[in-house]
Image: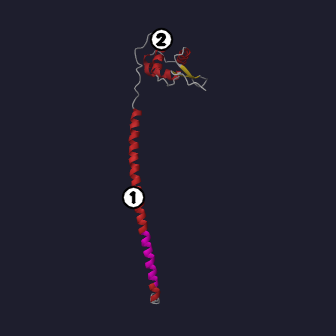
Amino acid sequence: MSRQLSVARILGELEERIEHHRRQEAHHAAQVALHQEQQARHAADLAVARERHATFLAAADAAGELVARPREERKVEGAMPEGKWAVLSTLIARLIVAKGPLESFGAKGIAAEIEERWGDRLQRPVDPRTVAAKLRRLAQRGLIHRLRTGRAYHESLFSQTPPPAES
């Protein structure tokens, strides 16, 4: 079949192929230049991202160490006071003094903290209702301030600092 093709037709086909491959080579050379440019840009962005990641990771680790460290609590331990009621009142007062000025607290939390710290030295478990009565008396005397009044399903909350005045 190739013998039946004319020389002119074969030359035309070869010239078309030469032109096609020349265009493809030029196109791909341009693509290589574009890809090299994009590769350089992405390499620079990658370096910046890795640096920021390492910096953020170091800051997160430092913050995690700070959060994981136990807080330096005020000294609330001490000798157990004498007397049936004096014991509980004194323990409640010690815990309230140890609270921060803006920290809120309720009877259940105070009772649980007393059980945790001094429970092994108490004769019986602390009743949160007894603690609530003591907190109410302290609030009436103005030594602590009620932040929220208790209801059937949530306890009263108190703080050493009065709540902000409502406008």
Q: Gap in Å between the C-alphas at discs 1 and 2? A: 76 Å
**Disc 1: which residue:** 40
For residue 156, say whether it is visible.
no
Return the x and y of residue 93 as percentages of the image width and height.
47, 16
For residue 44, say whether it is visible.
yes
Decide whether residue 115 is among the magenta residues: no
Disc on the earlier residue, 1 or 2: 1
Return the x and y of residue 135 as percentages of the image width and height.
53, 17
Q: Is residue 125 above or below residue 18?
A: above
In the image shown, does 71 or 111 lie closer to the viewer?
71
Going by the numbered disc 1, the residue's amino acid type is: Ala
Which quadrant of the rendered structure holds the C terminus? top right
Asked if disc 1 and disc 2 are in contact, CB closer than 8 Å, the reply is no
Q: Which is in the foreground here, disc 1 or disc 2?
A: 1
Element class at badge 2 = helix
| Residue under the point 39% across and 43% down | 55
**Disc 2: which residue:** 86
Q: Quadrant of residue 122?
A: top left
Element class at badge 1 = helix
Q: Is residue 110 above or below residue 6?
A: above
Return the x and y of residue 126 as percentages of the image width and height.
50, 18
Outermost residue on the front side: it is 167
* Segment colored magenta: 12-28
In the image shown, does 17 or 150 lie closer to the viewer?
17
Horizontally, residue 47 falls left or right of residue 96, namely left
Decide whether residue 15 is among the magenta residues: yes
| Residue under the point 41% across and 53% down | 45
Going by the numbered disc 2, the residue's amino acid type is: Ala
Horizontally, residue 127 falls left or right of residue 59, namely right
